[in-house]
Image (spheres, grey):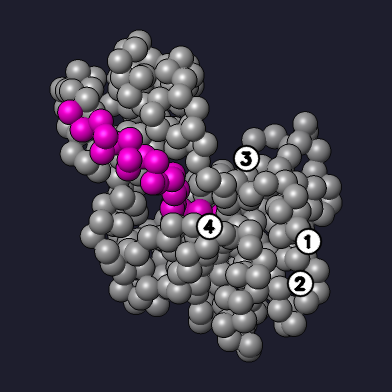
Amino acid sequence: MSAPTTDHDPAAVADRFARFARDEAPGRSDVYLAWAEGVAVDPGMCEILARIPATRRQPPLVFAVTRMLGAPLDGGYDAWAAFVRAHAATVVAECAARTLQTNEPLRCAALLPALARLQGPIALLELGASGGLCLYPDRYAYRFRAGDDVVAVDPGGGAAVVLEAELRGAVPDLRLPDVVWRAGIDLQPLDAGDPADRAWLEGLVWPEETARARRIAAAIDVAAADPPRLVAGDAADLGLVRRLAAEAPRDAALVITTPGVLPYVPRGRRDALIAALRAPGGIRPEPVHWITLDQPALHDAWTPPIDPGTWGPGFALALDGEVLAAADPLGAWIDWRA
Protein backbone atom coordinates (compact mmCIF):
# COMPACT_ATOMS: atom_id res chain seq x y z
CA MET A 1 0.00 0.00 0.00
CA SER A 2 3.05 2.25 0.26
CA ALA A 3 5.90 3.12 -2.10
CA PRO A 4 8.88 0.75 -2.04
CA THR A 5 11.72 1.82 0.23
CA THR A 6 15.41 1.58 -0.59
CA ASP A 7 17.68 -0.24 1.85
CA HIS A 8 20.94 -1.23 0.18
CA ASP A 9 22.04 -3.87 2.66
CA PRO A 10 23.59 -7.03 1.18
CA ALA A 11 23.81 -8.60 4.64
CA ALA A 12 20.04 -8.20 5.08
CA VAL A 13 19.53 -9.88 1.69
CA ALA A 14 21.67 -12.85 2.78
CA ASP A 15 19.71 -13.15 6.02
CA ARG A 16 16.34 -12.90 4.28
CA PHE A 17 17.14 -15.61 1.74
CA ALA A 18 18.70 -17.84 4.42
CA ARG A 19 15.49 -17.60 6.47
CA PHE A 20 13.42 -18.40 3.40
CA ALA A 21 15.58 -21.47 2.71
CA ARG A 22 15.25 -22.59 6.32
CA ASP A 23 11.61 -21.83 7.07
CA GLU A 24 9.56 -21.58 3.88
CA ALA A 25 10.97 -23.54 0.96
CA PRO A 26 11.57 -27.00 2.51
CA GLY A 27 8.90 -29.46 1.47
CA ARG A 28 7.41 -27.03 -1.00
CA SER A 29 10.05 -26.29 -3.62
CA ASP A 30 13.46 -27.90 -4.06
CA VAL A 31 14.22 -25.41 -6.83
CA TYR A 32 13.57 -22.34 -4.68
CA LEU A 33 15.37 -23.97 -1.75
CA ALA A 34 18.53 -24.40 -3.81
CA TRP A 35 18.34 -20.89 -5.22
CA ALA A 36 17.78 -19.31 -1.80
CA GLU A 37 20.61 -21.28 -0.20
CA GLY A 38 22.89 -20.16 -3.02
CA VAL A 39 21.98 -16.49 -2.66
CA ALA A 40 22.57 -16.59 1.10
CA VAL A 41 26.26 -17.50 0.66
CA ASP A 42 26.97 -15.53 -2.52
CA PRO A 43 28.12 -11.97 -1.64
CA GLY A 44 28.09 -10.88 -5.28
CA MET A 45 24.47 -11.95 -5.75
CA CYS A 46 23.46 -10.30 -2.47
CA GLU A 47 25.04 -7.09 -3.75
CA ILE A 48 22.92 -7.26 -6.94
CA LEU A 49 19.68 -8.04 -5.11
CA ALA A 50 20.34 -5.29 -2.54
CA ARG A 51 19.73 -2.83 -5.38
CA ILE A 52 16.05 -3.89 -5.33
CA PRO A 53 13.87 -1.82 -2.93
CA ALA A 54 13.63 -3.62 0.41
CA THR A 55 9.86 -4.07 0.11
CA ARG A 56 10.23 -5.73 -3.29
CA ARG A 57 12.98 -8.29 -2.70
CA GLN A 58 10.98 -11.12 -1.14
CA PRO A 59 12.52 -14.38 -2.40
CA PRO A 60 9.30 -15.63 -4.10
CA LEU A 61 8.98 -12.28 -5.92
CA VAL A 62 12.62 -12.27 -7.04
CA PHE A 63 12.39 -15.88 -8.20
CA ALA A 64 9.11 -15.30 -10.07
CA VAL A 65 10.57 -12.29 -11.86
CA THR A 66 13.66 -14.19 -12.94
CA ARG A 67 11.54 -17.07 -14.21
CA MET A 68 9.35 -14.65 -16.14
CA LEU A 69 12.49 -13.20 -17.74
CA GLY A 70 13.71 -16.65 -18.77
CA ALA A 71 15.88 -18.02 -15.96
CA PRO A 72 16.31 -21.80 -16.34
CA LEU A 73 14.69 -24.12 -13.82
CA ASP A 74 17.34 -26.79 -14.41
CA GLY A 75 21.05 -26.42 -13.80
CA GLY A 76 20.75 -25.57 -10.11
CA TYR A 77 21.87 -22.37 -8.48
CA ASP A 78 24.84 -21.83 -10.79
CA ALA A 79 22.66 -21.64 -13.92
CA TRP A 80 20.16 -19.33 -12.21
CA ALA A 81 22.88 -17.05 -10.83
CA ALA A 82 24.57 -16.80 -14.24
CA PHE A 83 21.27 -15.67 -15.74
CA VAL A 84 20.71 -13.06 -13.02
CA ARG A 85 24.22 -11.64 -13.42
CA ALA A 86 23.74 -11.39 -17.18
CA HIS A 87 20.40 -9.57 -16.77
CA ALA A 88 20.95 -7.79 -13.45
CA ALA A 89 19.60 -4.37 -14.47
CA THR A 90 16.42 -5.86 -15.90
CA VAL A 91 15.87 -8.11 -12.87
CA VAL A 92 16.27 -5.16 -10.48
CA ALA A 93 13.92 -2.96 -12.51
CA GLU A 94 11.21 -5.64 -12.85
CA CYS A 95 11.31 -6.50 -9.13
CA ALA A 96 11.03 -2.82 -8.23
CA ALA A 97 7.95 -2.49 -10.44
CA ARG A 98 6.09 -5.59 -9.22
CA THR A 99 4.49 -6.97 -6.08
CA LEU A 100 3.52 -10.42 -4.90
CA GLN A 101 -0.09 -10.92 -5.97
CA THR A 102 -1.35 -14.18 -4.53
CA ASN A 103 -4.44 -14.79 -6.64
CA GLU A 104 -5.52 -18.20 -5.38
CA PRO A 105 -9.02 -19.27 -6.55
CA LEU A 106 -9.02 -21.98 -3.86
CA ARG A 107 -9.83 -19.17 -1.40
CA CYS A 108 -13.35 -19.32 -2.85
CA ALA A 109 -13.77 -22.66 -1.04
CA ALA A 110 -13.35 -20.80 2.25
CA LEU A 111 -15.57 -17.91 1.18
CA LEU A 112 -18.38 -20.12 -0.13
CA PRO A 113 -19.97 -21.00 3.25
CA ALA A 114 -20.13 -17.29 4.10
CA LEU A 115 -21.66 -16.43 0.74
CA ALA A 116 -24.19 -19.26 1.19
CA ARG A 117 -25.68 -17.40 4.18
CA LEU A 118 -26.79 -14.52 1.92
CA GLN A 119 -30.02 -14.57 -0.06
CA GLY A 120 -30.77 -13.24 -3.54
CA PRO A 121 -28.49 -11.90 -6.23
CA ILE A 122 -25.05 -10.73 -5.17
CA ALA A 123 -22.80 -7.93 -6.41
CA LEU A 124 -19.25 -8.97 -5.52
CA LEU A 125 -16.48 -6.43 -4.93
CA GLU A 126 -13.00 -7.62 -3.90
CA LEU A 127 -10.41 -5.31 -2.39
CA GLY A 128 -6.94 -6.39 -3.49
CA ALA A 129 -8.29 -8.36 -6.43
CA SER A 130 -5.08 -8.94 -8.43
CA GLY A 131 -6.40 -10.67 -11.57
CA GLY A 132 -9.89 -11.21 -10.15
CA LEU A 133 -9.72 -15.01 -9.90
CA CYS A 134 -11.60 -14.95 -6.56
CA LEU A 135 -14.53 -13.10 -8.13
CA TYR A 136 -16.00 -16.26 -9.69
CA PRO A 137 -17.21 -18.41 -6.77
CA ASP A 138 -20.34 -19.19 -8.79
CA ARG A 139 -18.38 -20.51 -11.78
CA TYR A 140 -16.24 -23.06 -9.93
CA ALA A 141 -17.09 -26.59 -8.79
CA TYR A 142 -16.29 -27.69 -5.24
CA ARG A 143 -15.40 -30.97 -3.58
CA PHE A 144 -15.46 -30.71 0.20
CA ARG A 145 -14.03 -33.72 2.03
CA ALA A 146 -15.85 -34.32 5.33
CA GLY A 147 -14.36 -37.44 6.91
CA ASP A 148 -15.13 -40.30 4.53
CA ASP A 149 -17.76 -38.28 2.68
CA VAL A 150 -17.42 -35.80 -0.15
CA VAL A 151 -19.85 -32.91 -0.49
CA ALA A 152 -20.06 -31.79 -4.12
CA VAL A 153 -21.27 -28.35 -5.18
CA ASP A 154 -21.47 -27.80 -8.92
CA PRO A 155 -22.67 -25.04 -11.24
CA GLY A 156 -25.08 -25.97 -13.99
CA GLY A 157 -23.28 -27.16 -17.09
CA GLY A 158 -20.15 -28.21 -15.24
CA ALA A 159 -16.99 -26.26 -14.51
CA ALA A 160 -13.41 -26.22 -15.76
CA VAL A 161 -12.16 -25.39 -12.26
CA VAL A 162 -12.72 -27.89 -9.44
CA LEU A 163 -11.69 -26.72 -5.97
CA GLU A 164 -10.96 -29.33 -3.30
CA ALA A 165 -10.99 -28.53 0.41
CA GLU A 166 -11.29 -30.35 3.73
CA LEU A 167 -14.21 -29.72 6.07
CA ARG A 168 -13.46 -30.05 9.77
CA GLY A 169 -16.17 -30.04 12.41
CA ALA A 170 -19.76 -29.37 11.39
CA VAL A 171 -20.77 -29.21 7.72
CA PRO A 172 -22.17 -25.75 6.91
CA ASP A 173 -24.78 -24.90 4.32
CA LEU A 174 -23.04 -25.03 0.96
CA ARG A 175 -24.56 -23.62 -2.21
CA LEU A 176 -23.44 -21.44 -5.08
CA PRO A 177 -24.18 -17.72 -4.90
CA ASP A 178 -26.02 -15.89 -7.68
CA VAL A 179 -23.36 -13.35 -8.68
CA VAL A 180 -24.75 -10.74 -11.06
CA TRP A 181 -21.91 -8.18 -10.91
CA ARG A 182 -18.24 -8.54 -10.10
CA ALA A 183 -15.53 -5.93 -9.64
CA GLY A 184 -12.25 -5.37 -7.85
CA ILE A 185 -9.63 -2.82 -6.84
CA ASP A 186 -5.89 -3.42 -6.90
CA LEU A 187 -2.76 -1.29 -7.03
CA GLN A 188 -1.70 -3.26 -10.10
CA PRO A 189 -4.74 -5.09 -11.49
CA LEU A 190 -3.92 -7.89 -13.89
CA ASP A 191 -5.85 -8.62 -17.08
CA ALA A 192 -6.42 -12.36 -17.45
CA GLY A 193 -6.79 -11.83 -21.19
CA ASP A 194 -3.38 -10.19 -21.56
CA PRO A 195 -0.58 -12.71 -22.32
CA ALA A 196 1.99 -10.81 -20.23
CA ASP A 197 -0.31 -10.55 -17.21
CA ARG A 198 -1.25 -14.19 -17.57
CA ALA A 199 2.43 -15.17 -17.63
CA TRP A 200 3.00 -13.19 -14.42
CA LEU A 201 0.03 -14.80 -12.62
CA GLU A 202 1.21 -18.26 -13.64
CA GLY A 203 4.84 -17.42 -12.83
CA LEU A 204 3.92 -16.64 -9.22
CA VAL A 205 3.15 -20.34 -8.76
CA TRP A 206 6.17 -22.13 -7.30
CA PRO A 207 7.82 -24.61 -9.70
CA GLU A 208 6.70 -27.87 -8.07
CA GLU A 209 3.09 -26.78 -7.48
CA THR A 210 1.74 -28.52 -10.56
CA ALA A 211 -1.84 -28.98 -9.30
CA ARG A 212 -2.01 -25.32 -8.29
CA ALA A 213 -0.60 -24.29 -11.67
CA ARG A 214 -3.37 -26.19 -13.47
CA ARG A 215 -6.02 -24.70 -11.17
CA ILE A 216 -4.83 -21.13 -11.71
CA ALA A 217 -4.48 -21.59 -15.48
CA ALA A 218 -8.07 -22.83 -15.67
CA ALA A 219 -9.31 -19.97 -13.47
CA ILE A 220 -7.50 -17.46 -15.69
CA ASP A 221 -9.44 -18.87 -18.64
CA VAL A 222 -12.69 -18.26 -16.72
CA ALA A 223 -11.76 -14.65 -15.97
CA ALA A 224 -10.55 -13.99 -19.51
CA ALA A 225 -13.82 -15.25 -21.00
CA ASP A 226 -15.93 -12.88 -18.87
CA PRO A 227 -13.66 -10.13 -17.48
CA PRO A 228 -14.59 -8.45 -14.21
CA ARG A 229 -14.53 -4.70 -13.69
CA LEU A 230 -11.03 -4.10 -12.29
CA VAL A 231 -9.91 -0.64 -11.20
CA ALA A 232 -6.34 0.45 -10.48
CA GLY A 233 -6.03 2.14 -7.12
CA ASP A 234 -5.54 1.82 -3.39
CA ALA A 235 -8.00 -0.69 -1.95
CA ALA A 236 -8.09 1.33 1.29
CA ASP A 237 -9.14 4.53 -0.50
CA LEU A 238 -12.69 4.91 0.82
CA GLY A 239 -13.59 7.41 -1.90
CA LEU A 240 -12.61 4.91 -4.58
CA VAL A 241 -14.39 2.05 -2.82
CA ARG A 242 -17.56 4.12 -2.58
CA ARG A 243 -17.42 5.20 -6.23
CA LEU A 244 -17.01 1.64 -7.45
CA ALA A 245 -19.67 0.36 -5.04
CA ALA A 246 -22.07 2.93 -6.50
CA GLU A 247 -21.81 1.11 -9.85
CA ALA A 248 -23.19 -2.13 -8.39
CA PRO A 249 -26.83 -2.97 -9.14
CA ARG A 250 -29.10 -1.52 -6.45
CA ASP A 251 -31.29 -4.62 -6.37
CA ALA A 252 -28.35 -6.90 -5.55
CA ALA A 253 -26.75 -7.43 -2.15
CA LEU A 254 -23.33 -5.80 -2.29
CA VAL A 255 -20.70 -8.09 -0.78
CA ILE A 256 -17.21 -6.67 -0.26
CA THR A 257 -14.45 -9.23 0.33
CA THR A 258 -11.01 -8.53 1.76
CA PRO A 259 -9.20 -11.90 1.79
CA GLY A 260 -5.48 -11.32 2.25
CA VAL A 261 -5.34 -7.55 1.66
CA LEU A 262 -5.76 -6.03 5.14
CA PRO A 263 -2.23 -6.88 6.40
CA TYR A 264 -0.87 -4.53 3.73
CA VAL A 265 -3.01 -1.59 4.89
CA PRO A 266 -1.51 0.66 7.63
CA ARG A 267 -3.34 0.27 10.95
CA GLY A 268 -5.11 3.64 10.98
CA ARG A 269 -6.42 3.31 7.43
CA ARG A 270 -7.32 -0.34 8.05
CA ASP A 271 -9.44 0.62 11.04
CA ALA A 272 -11.16 3.37 9.01
CA LEU A 273 -11.92 0.93 6.19
CA ILE A 274 -13.33 -1.68 8.56
CA ALA A 275 -15.45 0.93 10.33
CA ALA A 276 -16.92 2.05 7.00
CA LEU A 277 -17.60 -1.55 5.95
CA ARG A 278 -19.49 -2.21 9.18
CA ALA A 279 -21.37 1.07 9.56
CA PRO A 280 -24.85 1.46 8.02
CA GLY A 281 -24.42 3.73 5.01
CA GLY A 282 -20.64 3.68 5.38
CA ILE A 283 -20.10 2.54 1.78
CA ARG A 284 -23.47 3.17 0.10
CA PRO A 285 -27.02 3.85 1.31
CA GLU A 286 -28.11 0.26 0.69
CA PRO A 287 -26.87 -2.51 3.04
CA VAL A 288 -23.36 -3.84 2.45
CA HIS A 289 -21.99 -7.19 3.62
CA TRP A 290 -18.32 -7.75 4.43
CA ILE A 291 -16.56 -11.11 4.18
CA THR A 292 -12.97 -11.42 5.27
CA LEU A 293 -10.35 -14.08 5.96
CA ASP A 294 -7.67 -12.72 8.28
CA GLN A 295 -5.18 -13.52 11.01
CA PRO A 296 -7.11 -13.30 14.32
CA ALA A 297 -4.64 -10.76 15.74
CA LEU A 298 -4.81 -8.46 12.71
CA HIS A 299 -7.77 -6.43 13.98
CA ASP A 300 -10.43 -6.54 16.69
CA ALA A 301 -13.58 -6.34 14.54
CA TRP A 302 -14.63 -9.87 15.46
CA THR A 303 -17.93 -10.98 17.02
CA PRO A 304 -17.48 -12.59 19.46
CA PRO A 305 -14.00 -11.22 20.24
CA ILE A 306 -11.13 -13.54 19.40
CA ASP A 307 -8.31 -14.41 21.77
CA PRO A 308 -5.42 -15.10 19.37
CA GLY A 309 -3.65 -17.07 22.08
CA THR A 310 -6.38 -19.71 22.19
CA TRP A 311 -7.59 -19.53 18.59
CA GLY A 312 -5.46 -22.34 17.19
CA PRO A 313 -4.35 -22.80 13.58
CA GLY A 314 -5.73 -20.95 10.61
CA PHE A 315 -7.22 -17.56 9.84
CA ALA A 316 -10.66 -16.38 10.94
CA LEU A 317 -13.49 -16.33 8.39
CA ALA A 318 -16.18 -13.78 9.19
CA LEU A 319 -19.35 -12.34 7.68
CA ASP A 320 -20.12 -8.80 8.84
CA GLY A 321 -17.69 -9.37 11.70
CA GLU A 322 -19.41 -12.56 12.89
CA VAL A 323 -16.82 -15.31 13.17
CA LEU A 324 -17.93 -18.36 11.19
CA ALA A 325 -14.89 -20.61 10.93
CA ALA A 326 -11.19 -21.10 11.16
CA ALA A 327 -9.73 -21.69 7.72
CA ASP A 328 -6.50 -22.20 5.87
CA PRO A 329 -5.34 -18.81 4.50
CA LEU A 330 -5.57 -20.14 0.94
CA GLY A 331 -8.73 -22.23 1.42
CA ALA A 332 -7.36 -25.77 1.73
CA TRP A 333 -9.44 -26.51 4.86
CA ILE A 334 -12.33 -25.04 6.83
CA ASP A 335 -13.15 -25.67 10.50
CA TRP A 336 -16.77 -24.48 10.87
CA ARG A 337 -17.50 -22.82 14.23
CA ALA A 338 -20.68 -20.79 13.72
Identify the element where label 1 is drawn: helix
Label whose residue precedes the other's in the sequence (1 or 3): 1
- What residue did someone put label 4 on? 128
Q: Which numbered mark, 1 or 3, is in the foreground of this view?
A: 1
Identify the element where label 4 is drawn: loop
**Quadrant assignment for the C terminus:** bottom right
- What residue did someone put label 2 on? 282
Disc number placed over residue 35 in the picture, else none = none
Q: Which residues are magenta?
A: 86-111
Q: Which numbered mark, 4 or 3, is in the foreground of this view?
A: 4
Is 92 a magenta residue?
yes
- What residue did someone put label 3 on? 314
Does 103 sit left or right of 81 as displayed? Answer: right
Q: Amino acid at mark 4?
A: Gly
> How far is the residue under mark 3 from the one under mark 2?
29 Å
Q: Amino acid at mark 1?
A: Ala
Q: Callout 2 environment at 10 Å: few (<14), some (14 to 19), or many (20+)? A: some
Residues under numbered marks 1 and 2 in contact, where contact means CB atoms less than 8 Å apart: yes
Which quadrant of the structure image shows residue 8? Answer: top left
Nearer the observer, 16 or 123: 16
Disc number placed over residue 275 in the picture, else none = 1
Q: Amino acid at mark 2?
A: Gly
- Residue 169 at least partly seen: no
| Image location (x, y in percent) of residue 300 | 80, 47
Q: Amino acid at mark 3?
A: Gly
- Residue at horizontal 80%, vertical 69%? 279
| For residue 316, above or below residue 53 | below
